[in-house]
Image: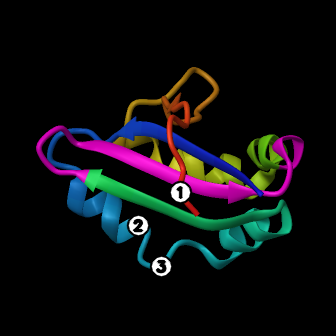
Amino acid sequence: MIRKAFVMSVAPGQEQEYARRHQPIWTELATVLRDHGSHNYSIFLHPATRQLFGYVEIEDEARWQAVAGTEVCQRWWRFMRELMPANPDGSPVAVDLTEMFHLD
């Protein structure tokens, strides 16, 4: 299993709406994520900075990257775009983090 972590952010004043839109996440998006080998996916909010810390375990990097090309992911990005900084392709601005320590 590959552990991935990344940081995104939510726009000022949009924290509650961001949380609301994830409760629950669309069933079809959860299915796509699982079907592409994603497990133990969590997103945490740092309230003072509005940073979102994402963590996911994936089976394969190519399958993880393929999620972005699915219709449901593209629709989700459009749905979330007003709440967070986005790239020109609609994806959320995210910075991958480098694992520095792990304890099983």
Q: Which residue is mark 2?
A: 21
Residue at the image position 78 percent from the left and 52 percent from the top: 71
Of 59 and 86, the residue lying toward us: 59
In the picture, the quarter occupied by the N terminus is bottom right
Inter-mark Cα distance, 2 to 3: 7 Å
Q: Residue furthest top?
A: 88
Which quarter of the picture shows residue 22?
Answer: bottom left
Residue 68 at x, y = what percent? 74, 43
20 lies left or right of 94: left
Query: If you read the primary sequence from the N terminus, does the residue marked by circle 1 or circle 3 appear first?
Result: 3
Inter-mark Cα distance, 1 to 3: 30 Å
The stretch in magenta equals 46-63
Q: Which residue is mark 1?
A: 103
Which quarter of the picture shows residue 41?
Answer: bottom right
50 lies left or right of 97: left
Inter-mark Cα distance, 2 to 1: 32 Å
Q: Which residue is mark 3?
A: 24
